[in-house]
Image: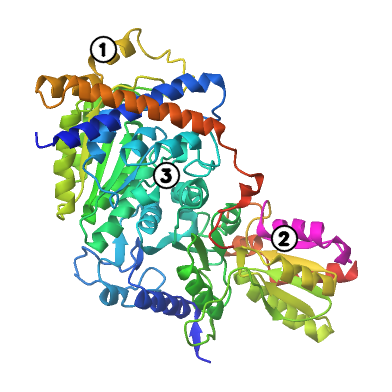
């Protein structure tokens, strides 16, 4: 199986669908870059995270559109273009900027289908980069997928591995509902095996990357890598855990989580978002309601702090979940 | 005037239908059978109809919270609209949208919109689809004077210009942004509303929104330019709202006699009737016949809406997604 980076996996999925379906377009700030610049060169930066190599040359102005810095118009344009018969993928460079365009997600595209009595089809994907770890500070680091997960009418993807990024992006681009796709900006360079071909990964199906008997660790995005590191280390002490990555927070694979908790009797949730109304608290409530009898210990949540994301590297590390905290949480469930 | 007799009759029928639809709602709402918030369009009919008589089903419009007129002008089924406003299963949106969210995508009506300034970015996006398709379709953002102070509208206008999209921004200046006048809320004064669009680099003009013929011609010119690749235009039409911002609005912000004066002197239907009969284009009898037919239609619409069932409770979670 070929090995590629998370970044390359995104590019490959985007290219597969752009090549396959002429109605697919991509729009965003600096996606090609260089328009109107003094060098006259387009496409030489491949987008701010390098996910669009040579896309401008390949797909042209009408299908690969550099936009002004106008988030509300970008997402509104996606909603309107989708109603108009296209399949737009738009990039909101940093997830924090969703503050500028939340209306077009929350009040417009998410609701067309329902408000219009089931007549609308809004096939759009909003790609955005989230997450802390790069000292990008309070307005360029947030893990805000719980805010979006809260909204009925959108689907939410939070992938952790290159193979998932490719398969889930293919599914997102073929889906007829609005999909918000959160890429972790600290994962773009991470490599992994990625299947060839153009098979999508269905939404609402968790991936179980480690299997064990003692504890279930549910983690998302970059936290999956943290969880795997911890779980691999605990094996030396004879402790084995499931690592369950839901991959999509909406829809959520409740069955996979409950099945794992039924087997292990213990649950640790690792979520990079801040704790209140987080994916961790949501899953915790779900398991408390539906899996109470499975539990041999209180559910543990390892989340970021209830604070803005700090700038100083030591503070940012303090803010984020750590492998030490994850390990301590697992051990607490075992010691209970 | 290039409109044929049939076209004139149709335009009158559309305007009259909007007027009677809204006037009837104004009577029905206090009776308590209509849930929620309703914003009536009476007084502005010439704008919706003057615009939409230039459009086909394959062209798109976005609308506002005051959207009934736009829906009727764009061809939405009147009975389906009435049932929707009454919250019934037979409504155009199955009773899930209501007054502020009526849509009929098969007619190019991309939705009334409860968010001021929500529509123009969507119209601009439809413009991208139309530009790429290359069949000469146009997208129209029907917006109010209130939205001319909304950032996403500016963003949409700028993007429409820089991407040279077939989009027309129509600002209906009915004298009140909800309950506050543009004379107060528009920096630079109310006369400068459409000049803002000009600043984005598109042709912009202002006209009399109570004169169907002026709206029809000004919009027709803008639509022609957009269809032939000439890019966006902004138009502002002045008019006066006959009712409040919402039904139940005490309207203490309006001077006594303002509405009476508007009904007397700025009524687009009276204006239209006078013009076409004085020019002997249509007979009063032609128009009277339409009046009677429209009244009949509205009566039936209300009767059928009230007789229709409410949506089945199982509908509450249906159509949130296409698949989930």
Instruction: Give the class, few, some or many, for how many residues have Cα within 10 Å of label 3's Cα (few <14, many ≥20).
Output: many
**Residue A30, position as x, y percentages in the image:** 33, 64
Instruction: Give the class, few, some or many, for how many residues have Cα within 10 Å of label 1's Cα (few <14, many ≥20).
Output: few
**Which of these two is toward me, A279 or B103?**
B103
Judged from this view, the residue extending furthest toward the bottom is A1
The chain identifier of the residue carrying mark 1 reads B
Q: Which residue is mark 2?
A: A283
Q: Quadrant of the C terminus of chain B?
A: bottom right
Chain part drawn in magenta: A277-303
Q: Which residue is mark 3?
A: B103
The chain identifier of the residue carrying mark 3 reads B
Q: Relative to A156, does residue B278 appear above or below in the rendering?
A: above
What's the residue at 45%, 54% (across, down)? A120
Are the residues flagged by discs 2 and 3 in contact, CB closer than 8 Å? no
Residue B196 appears anywhere in the view? no
What label does residue B264 carry, if any?
A: 1
Residue A25 forms part of the magenta stretch: no
What's the residue at 21%, 32% (across, down)? B9
* Left or right placement of residue A246 versus residue B198 in this view: right
Q: Relative to A124, does residue B93 appear above or below in the rendering?
A: above
Real-space CA distance between mark 3 and mark 1, rounded to the nearest whole angstrom:
32 Å
* Colour mode of the rendering: rainbow
SS assignment at label 1: helix
């Amino acid at each position: 199986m070929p090995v590629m980076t998370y970044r390359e996996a995104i590019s490959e999925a985007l290219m597969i669908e752009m090549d396959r379906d002429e109605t697919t377009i991509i729009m965003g700030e600096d996606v090609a870059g260089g328009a109107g610049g003094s060098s006259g060169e387009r496409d030489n930066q491949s987008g701010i995270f390098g996910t669009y190599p040579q896309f401008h040359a390949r797909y042209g102005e009408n299908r690969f559109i550099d936009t002004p810095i106008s988030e509300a118009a970008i997402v509104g344009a996606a909603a309107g273009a989708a109603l108009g018969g296209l399949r737009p993928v738009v990039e909101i460079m940093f997830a924090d900027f969703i503050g500028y365009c939340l209306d077009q997600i929350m009040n417009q595209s998410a609701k067309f289908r329902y408000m219009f009595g089931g007549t609308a089809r809004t096939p759009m994907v909003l790609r955005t980069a989230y997450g802390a770890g790069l000292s990008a500070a309070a307005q360029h680091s947030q893990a805000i997928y719980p805010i979006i997960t809260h909204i009925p009418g959108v689907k939410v993807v939070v992938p952790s591995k290159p193979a998932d990024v490719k398969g889930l992006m293919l599914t997102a681009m073929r889906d007829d509902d609005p999909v918000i796709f959160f890429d972790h900006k600290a994962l773009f360079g991470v490599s992994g095996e990625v299947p060839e071909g153009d098979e999508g990964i269905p939404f609402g199906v968790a991936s179980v990357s480690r299997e064990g008997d003692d504890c279930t660790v549910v983690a998302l995005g970059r936290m999956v890598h943290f969880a795997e590191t911890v779980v691999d280390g605990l094996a030396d002490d004879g402790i084995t855990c499931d690592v369950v990555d839901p991959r999509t927070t909406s829809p959520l694979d409740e069955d996979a989580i409950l099945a794992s908790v039924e087997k292990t009797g213990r649950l640790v949730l690792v979520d990079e978002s801040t704790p209140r109304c987080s994916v961790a608290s949501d899953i915790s409530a779900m398991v408390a309601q539906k899996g109470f009898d499975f539990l041999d210990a209180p559910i543990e949540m390892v989340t970021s702090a209830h604070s803005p994301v700090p700038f100083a590297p030591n503070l940012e590390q303090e803010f984020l979940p750590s492998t030490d905290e994850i390990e301590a949480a697992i051990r607490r469930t075992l010691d209970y | 005037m290039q409109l044929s007799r049939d076209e004139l009759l149709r335009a009158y029928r559309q305007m009259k239908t909007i007027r009677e639809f809204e006037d009837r709602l104004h009577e029905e709402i206090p009776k308590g059978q209509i849930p929620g918030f309703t914003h009536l369009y009476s007084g502005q009919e010439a704008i919706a109809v003057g615009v939409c008589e230039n459009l086909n089903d394959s062209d798109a419009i976005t609308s506002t919270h005051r959207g009934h007129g736009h829906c009727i002008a764009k061809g939405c089924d009147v009975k389906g609209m009435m049932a929707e406003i009454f919250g019934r299963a037979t409504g155009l949106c199955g009773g899930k949208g209501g007054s502020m969210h009526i849509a009929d995508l098969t007619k190019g009506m991309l939705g009334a919109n409860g968010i001021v300034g929500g529509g123009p970015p969507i119209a601009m996006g439809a413009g991208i689809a139309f530009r790429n398709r290359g069949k000469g379709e146009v997208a129209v953002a029907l917006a109010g004077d209130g939205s001319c102070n909304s950032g996403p509208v500016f963003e949409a206008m700028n993007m429409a210009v820089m991407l040279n999209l077939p989009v027309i921004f129509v600002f209906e200046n009915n004298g009140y942004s909800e309950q506050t006048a543009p004379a107060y809320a528009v920096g630079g004064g109310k006369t400068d509303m459409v000049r803002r669009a000009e600043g984005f680099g598109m042709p912009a003009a202002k006209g009399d929104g109570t004169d169907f013929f002026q709206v029809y011609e000004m919009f027709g010119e803008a639509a022609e330019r957009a269809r032939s690749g000439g890019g966006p235009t902004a138009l502002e039409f002045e008019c006066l709202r006959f009712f409040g911002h919402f039904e139940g609005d005490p309207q203490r912000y309006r001077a006594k006699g303002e509405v009476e004066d508007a009904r007397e002197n700025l009524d687009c239907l009276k204006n239209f009737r006078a013009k076409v009969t004085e020019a002997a284009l249509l007979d009063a009898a032609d128009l009277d016949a339409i009046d009677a037919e429209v009244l009949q239609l509205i009566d039936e619409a209300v009767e059928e809406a009230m007789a229709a069932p409410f949506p089945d409770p199982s509908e509450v979670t249906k159509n949130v997604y296409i698949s989930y």
